[in-house]
Image: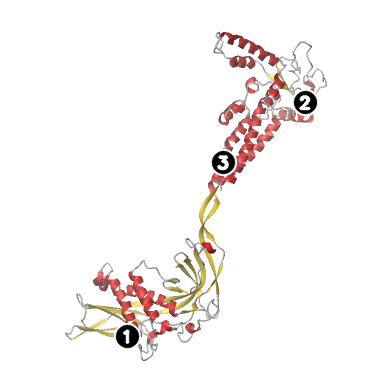
């Protein structure tokens, strides 16, 4: 993954390293073309053999700022490859998958099938509600998120071998219909009346015109139950069938003294258009957001909702405790009804017993209302899935959006910004370097076949010159001293050949004749009409005059006036074969008489 950017970085680095190497090889000739170049900045200079970290300060001391800046850019390019390698990174990202059209399995409608008539659905819901509150790690059924019961839809395939989606980390987002169950429980004061000395107690409650009376006998220290209330004409629940009437969870204790607790619940349901989130791997609903109230005329999946919003329910909710059973009552159905009426309060009682304060604290603090609400609401929510949902009369499609955690490649913020800044700096300064170097070498004309650094180029510029004879003489003297000194050092002065050459050349100044490409030493024939010493680098164009004078000389040289030695071309030293003042080019240096070696001899 990181290979392409690293390869590009390597190419950019290699290209600039090559350019930097050529600039360094050419620098001695550029300095000679400026004129009066000391040997440590020309003949004895070799930047190509030094590390760039050492080349930068050395070039700065020599005022070769183009070379120094080029070396600095090479150092900058050393950061390209590590930054390019860190440019791309893999992150686990929340990623949207293509939308899926799935079949809607259930929709709002009253289900009065066999499970409804024989109370199997009610008993099953009561059993699961009891288990779920007692064992808190028990997950809810699919499409259940208390207090919401969501109309189920088909789940996508998770068989990745058959083109399914990965279940782990995938969340489904869908619009559907939900039934919101509301327990409507609240505590009541119990009127307790002893019945003689028998230990029996008459108990009664009244809540907004709905009353319940019950009597307990001391057959056990703790008693409980769930019954429906009887509502009078002043109650808003008056005239309701028993299966829709408010119910009461009551609890009685003889230990240590007789005490009673009662909770009245008025269950109801609300229908909502919702958007849900479901974890595909666990198939649990993690979020339900209400969008708008359900409408039988405009909401999706509403074709069978008329028997809930209208007759026979008219928006009411079954209490799940009392039932309108046909006569004669099946004994098995009757047993299920009794089991439901016992199982729900038994779950509440068991929760109170297992609480931190035990039963006594539960009566003292009257926490039965909270426990009753918890159990009863879970029961109503589970019950809604089998009572208030039916299969659609025809196939209906639900569009589901899936999102999952996937590995995706991103640009590293830090590496991207650093690499961008480095590339911009390289582009800017490389352009400046090329422009300045082009200006610096404007007076240097190297033939296409001339390759600085080769033996042929060294012979071309240095052979048959006064400098060559001087070096040959130094070489002969050095060989003579070495003949008497096995270690190659002079026994008299202790100096090496390199030291001697440096000292001898250090006393001279040099120029290069652009016509013959010969190095001309100070004092040789042709030195005067070789390149003028006033032709300085772009950083030091002249040692005389101000900015105007320097600009004038540059414009004069570009216009062909010359401008080599003094302000005007008329004062310029003339080549013997070209006496015309201000000539922009000098002819080849004259040959020396036969038998002598001149500066211009080829």
Q: CA distance from mark 2 to mark 3?
A: 47 Å
Element under disc 1: strand
Q: Residues within 10 Å of mark 2 (few under 14, many from 20)?
A: many
Q: CA distance from mark 1 to mark 3?
A: 84 Å
Q: Look at the picture and state if 56 lies above or below 299.
A: above
Q: Is residue 577 left or right of residue 467?
A: right
Element under disc 2: loop
Q: Residues within 10 Å of mark 3 (few under 14, many from 20)?
A: many
Residue that label 2 marks: 562
Residue 569 is situated, as x and y percent measured from the top left of the image, at: 78, 24
Residue that label 1 marks: 211
The residue depicted at 43 percent of the width and 72 percent of the height is 144
Q: Residue furthest front?
A: 161
Camera-side mark, 1 or 3: 3
Q: Residue furthest left?
A: 197
Camera-side mark, 1 or 2: 1
Nearest the camera: 506 or 351?
Answer: 351
């Amino acid at each position: 993954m990181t290979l392409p950017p690293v390869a590009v970085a390597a190419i950019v680095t290699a290209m600039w390293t090559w350019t930097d190497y050529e600039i360094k090889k050419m620098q001695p000739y550029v300095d000679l073309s400026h004129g009066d170049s000391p040997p440590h900045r020309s003949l004895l200079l070799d930047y190509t053999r030094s590390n760039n970290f050492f080349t930068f300060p050395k070039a700065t001391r020599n005022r070769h700022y183009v070379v120094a800046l080029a070396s600095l850019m090479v150092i900058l390019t050393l950061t390209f490859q590590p930054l390019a390698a860190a440019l791309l990174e893999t992150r686990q990202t929340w990623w949207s998958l293509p939308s899926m059209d799935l079949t809607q399995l259930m929709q709002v409608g009253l289900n009065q099938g066999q499970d409804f008539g024989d109370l199997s659905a009610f008993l099953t819901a009561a059993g699961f509600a009891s288990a779920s509150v007692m064992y808190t790690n028990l997950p809810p059924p699919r499409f259940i998120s208390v207090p919401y019961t969501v109309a189920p839809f088909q789940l996508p395939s998770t068989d990745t071998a058959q083109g399914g989606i990965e279940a782990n980390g995938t969340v489904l987002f869908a619009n559907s219909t939900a039934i919101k169950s509301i327990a409507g429980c609240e505590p009541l004061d119990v009127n307790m009346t002893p019945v003689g000395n028998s230990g029996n107690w008459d108990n009664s409650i009244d809540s907004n015109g709905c009353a319940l009376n019950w009597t307990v006998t001391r057959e056990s220290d703790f008693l409980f139950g769930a019954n429906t209330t009887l509502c009078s004409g002043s109650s808003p629940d008056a005239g309701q069938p028993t299966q829709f009437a408010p119910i009461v969870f009551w609890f009685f204790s003889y230990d240590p003294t007789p005490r009673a607790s009662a909770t009245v619940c008025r269950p109801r349901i609300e229908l909502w258009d919702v958007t849900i989130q479901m974890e595909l791997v666990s198939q649990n609903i993690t979020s339900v957001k209400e969008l708008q109230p359900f409408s039988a005329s405009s909401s999706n999946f509403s074709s069978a909702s008329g028997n809930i919003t209208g007759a026979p329910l008219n928006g009411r909710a079954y209490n799940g405790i009392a039932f309108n059973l046909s006569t004669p009552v099946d004994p098995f159905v009757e047993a299920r009804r009794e089991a439901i009426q016992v199982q729900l309060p038994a779950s509440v009682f068991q929760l109170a017993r297992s609480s931190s304060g035990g039963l006594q604290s539960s009566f003292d603090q009257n926490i039965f209302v909270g426990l009753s609400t918890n159990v009863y609401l879970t029961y109503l929510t589970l019950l809604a899935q089998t009572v208030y949902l039916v299969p659609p009369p025809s196939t209906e499609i639900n569009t589901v959006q899936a999102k999952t955690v996937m590995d995706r490649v991103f640009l590293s913020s830090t590496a991207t910004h650093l690499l961008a800044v480095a590339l911009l700096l390289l582009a800017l300064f490389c352009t400046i370097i090329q422009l300045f170097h082009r200006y610096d070498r404007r007076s240097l004309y190297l033939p296409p076949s001339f390759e600085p650094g080769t033996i042929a180029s060294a012979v071309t510029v240095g052979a048959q010159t006064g400098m060559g004879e001087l070096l040959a003489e130094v070489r002969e003297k050095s060989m003579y001293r070495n003949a008497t000194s096995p270690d190659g050092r002079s026994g008299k002065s202790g100096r090496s050949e390199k030291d001697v050459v440096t000292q001898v050349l250090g006393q001279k100044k040099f120029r290069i004749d652009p016509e013959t490409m010969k190095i001309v030493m100070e004092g040789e024939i042709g030195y005067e009409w070789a390149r003028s010493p006033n032709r300085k680098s772009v950083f030091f164009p002249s040692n005389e005059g101000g900015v105007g004078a320097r600009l004038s000389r540059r414009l004069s040289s570009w216009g062909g006036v010359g401008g080599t030695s003094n302000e005007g071309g008329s004062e310029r030293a003339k080549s013997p074969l070209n006496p015309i003042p201000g000539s922009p080019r000098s002819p080849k240096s004259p040959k020396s008489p036969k038998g002598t070696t001149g500066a211009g001899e080829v």
